[in-house]
Image: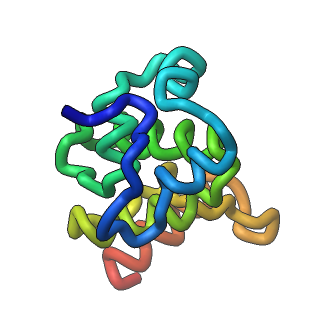
Amino acid sequence: MTNVDGGAPEEHTTLGLGNRRRKKKISLDQIAQETKIGVRALQAIETEDFKKLPGGIYSTSYIRQYAKAIDFDEGQILALYYSVMGTTPLLDESPEKPSASEGNLVSRFLRHTSAVLGS
């Protein structure tokens, strides 16, 4: 059975999230209490077994909260998530914040729409 704190060292993960968390002396139970995310979902993020997450915006939200809890760049985890899941981020799920020069949401939508329609 798996230890909730992930006592055994990780094997075969790309980002080594569990090791980072343990070095910071943070337990999965602490993150679960702080974020209200179940320990199983947190374990899925650590082991990069993203197919066990609920999907869609829930998955990306869980990943962002986990990253914040262990002070890790959410963009790296999200990039791996999208790669593993074979998807691309939605405009509002993009790990990078739009710069001021990109304009507001309406402007971005119109640019996207015109690019899709080929106008």
Along the line of sight, which residue is nearer the eye, 79 or 104? Answer: 79
Front residue of 112 and 94: 94
**What residue appears at the point 34 percent right and 75 percent down from the top-left corner?**
116
x then y, percent, for residue 10: 37, 58
Q: Quadrant of residue 65?
A: top right
Give how far across and how far down residue 29 sits, in percent. Answer: 48, 22
Of residues 94 and 32, which is closer to you in this image?
Answer: 32
Report the residue at 26% width, 51% height from top. Answer: 50
In the image, 15: left or right of 45?
right
Q: Is residue 88 visible?
A: no
Q: How far across and how far down the image is residue 31, in percent?
A: 55, 27
Q: Quadrant of the N terminus?
A: top left
In which image quadrant can residue 9 be found? Answer: bottom left
Looking at the image, residue 34 lies above or below residue 71? above
Tell whether 51 sits left or right of 99. Answer: left
Up/down of 15 relative to 20, above or below: below
Which residue is at a point 26% across and 35% down the rendered structure image? 2
Q: Position of residue 92 (x, y in %)?
A: 51, 50
- Please, which colouring scheme is shown? rainbow
Quadrant into which the C terminus falls: bottom left
Q: Vertical placement of 11 versus 35: above or below?
A: below
